[in-house]
Amino acid sequence: MREHFDVLVVGAGLSGIAAGYHLQTHCPGRTYAILEGRERMGGTWDLFRYPGIRSDSDMFTLGFSFRPWTDAKAIADGDAILRYLQDTAQAFGIDRHIRYQHKVTEAAWSTEEALWTVTVVAAGRRRQFSCSFLFLCAGYYNYARGHLPDFPGREAFRGRVVHPQFWTPDIDYAGKRVVVIGSGATAVTLVPELAKQAAHVTMLQRSPTYIVARPSQDRIANALRRVLPAKLAYGLTRWKNVLLGQYFYALARRHPAKAKERLVEMVRCELGHDYDVATHFTPSYNPWDQRLCLVPDADLFAALREGRAEVVTDQIERFTPDGLRLASDRELAADLVVTATGLEVQLMGGIPVMVDGRLVDWSERLTYKGMMFSGVPNFAIAFGYTNASWTLKADLTARYVTRLLNAMASRGIRQVTPQPAGPVEAQPFLDFTSGYVRRALSLLPRQGHRKPWRVHQSYTRDLMALSFGGIDDEMEFSNPEPAKRRAA
Ligand SMILES: Cc1cc2nc3c(=O)[nH]c(=O)nc-3n(C[C@H](O)[C@H](O)[C@H](O)COP(=O)(O)OP(=O)(O)OC[C@H]3O[C@@H](n4cnc5c(N)ncnc54)[C@H](O)[C@@H]3O)c2cc1C
């Protein structure tokens, strides 16, 4: 027996909660369930437990469009974000739709039935569900594994090695010499936090990243909140941050040399002219070829200035019993090594997806409006922006799915399939040079050179296209005849 829902959402993280809200608000007649592999909701914000875990974008855009973020901090701590997600799910009754410990292991579309059959392992037992529309909100990385380069001699090291994705509360760093390998958002979050208790923290990076300091509190937002109703103040701040973000992004892409100069100069102002900013904080790439790293209240720079932490730009030759030997011959003594070396990108929640008996090879598919795929019926994913908060796109995508479902209902249509109506030049899914993206690019779908196959990293463009634009462009609405009727 298959339990049936009109819509199945996979994943109860931020995107799955947004999906639940939009489905029940805009398609009240449809049934839905959220299948979550873990025992709790929250996704990223429940999984990651390393010291100092926080957002690196502001909560007015990382928060939902339909529920104001009311804490004073705009760059928020992980547990405050998790609480916000839990409160939102509870306030709207979305939590009642979540089936925990339901890990989806396969999804198969049948055109004859116009249904997805979704196989799940729940409490060790295999079960099947069916649905008319499958909405994957399964994030973008592997929960079981982080990216870990093969460092020679690791087994010889006498201290502890930990990946931030698997941080546990028993990890003791007080009074210890800690080396954090990496230069991304996780590393720059960990370093000042660990430095509060550790004997010394070294951030060991192969190459530098652009790092921008910003206040953790948004003074304008807090002032607006004092005089305006919460929803209005939130909406205004959200738009302010969206537009400012887009403006600075466009400026940096148009004038990369000037942007680079300005970003590096800002670091120099923080660390002083004697500091070797050229080596440690001047990347070789242009701003926004990779995501910029944000440090709230310049906490990383304070730790460096006070000598509690240090940045070393070098290559690891090998682990030694006492730490790390670097290509420059320098030795870094360590009791604890934190490998902030990144995520392993995984789309589709690691779920093999079949369409009429054939396994979908995503690298052969084109993404449609950054959320559906050529030739894959009644299927969408939530995938956020690389240059702005994830929620902005997740929210728009969920709303678009409800528009599509309502159009199908009013036209009496069972199947919607994106299909290119003319030639489309395939391009990489993401225009980003970060290691975790480059490692995964060959497995990812492609984007096209033109609408609606192009992925826009722009909230305002997507808002126009997904909330107000048509839904018929290169979308096939069909009612394939069931086999039984065809045979009769
Ligand atoms: C440390 C860290 C900090 C970040 N900070 C920011 C930030 O400040 N701003 C920003 O915009 N983005 C940030 N991101 C990106 C972040 O992942 C997104 O913002 C957001 O949390 C993604 O939400 P999601 O619901 O799409 O995915 P996730 O949070 O990854 O949730 C996916 C859910 O799907 C479930 N799932 C996956 N596969 C299956 C399956 N097969 N069956 C059942 N369930 C499944 C998972 O268990 C999980 O609960 C950060 C990421 C990390 C790792």
Image (cartoon, rainbow, N blue to C red):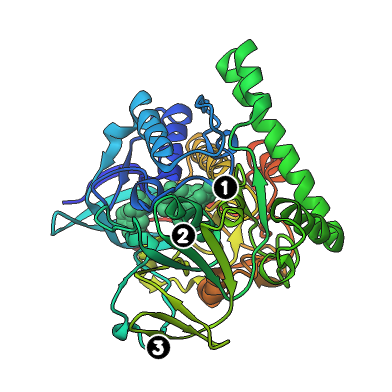
Provide residue 290's location: percent of width, then percent of height: 65, 63
Q: Tell me the CA gap for discs 3 and 1.
A: 32 Å
Say what secondary structure mark 3 lies in: loop
- For the point 37% across and 66% down, the residue is 163
Whether pointer 3 and pointer 2 mark residues with C-beta atoms closer than 8 Å, the reply is: no
Label 1 beta carbon less than 8 Å to ligand 1? no
Query: In the rendering, at what x and y percent does residue 176 appear?
Result: 36, 62
Residue under label 2: 140
Would the CB of label 3 be found within 8 Å of ligand 1? no
Q: Which mark is residue 190?
A: none
Q: Amino acid at mark 2?
A: Tyr
Name the one closer to the observer, 142 or 364.
142
The numbered mark, 3 or 1, whose residue comes first in the sequence reads 3
Assign a secondary structure to mark 2: loop
The residue at the point 44 percent across, 48 percent down is 52
Apparent side of residue 205 relative to residue 261 in the rendered image (left or right): left
The residue under label 3 is which amino acid type? Pro
Residue 247, above or below 144:
above
Q: Quadrant of residue 393?
A: top right
| Secondary structure beneath label 1 | helix
Residue kind at label 1, given as amino acid type: Asp
Q: Can residue 135 be seen from the camera position used here?
A: no
Packing grade of label 1 (10 A; few <14, some 14-19, many >=20) is: some
For residue 152, which numbered disc appears in the image? Answer: 3
Near mark 2 (Cα within 10 A), the count class, few <14, some 14-19 or many ≥20, is: some
Residue under pointer 1: 299
Mark 3 vs mark 2, foreground winner is 3
Whichever of labels 3 and 2 marks the residue nearer the N terminus, that label is 2
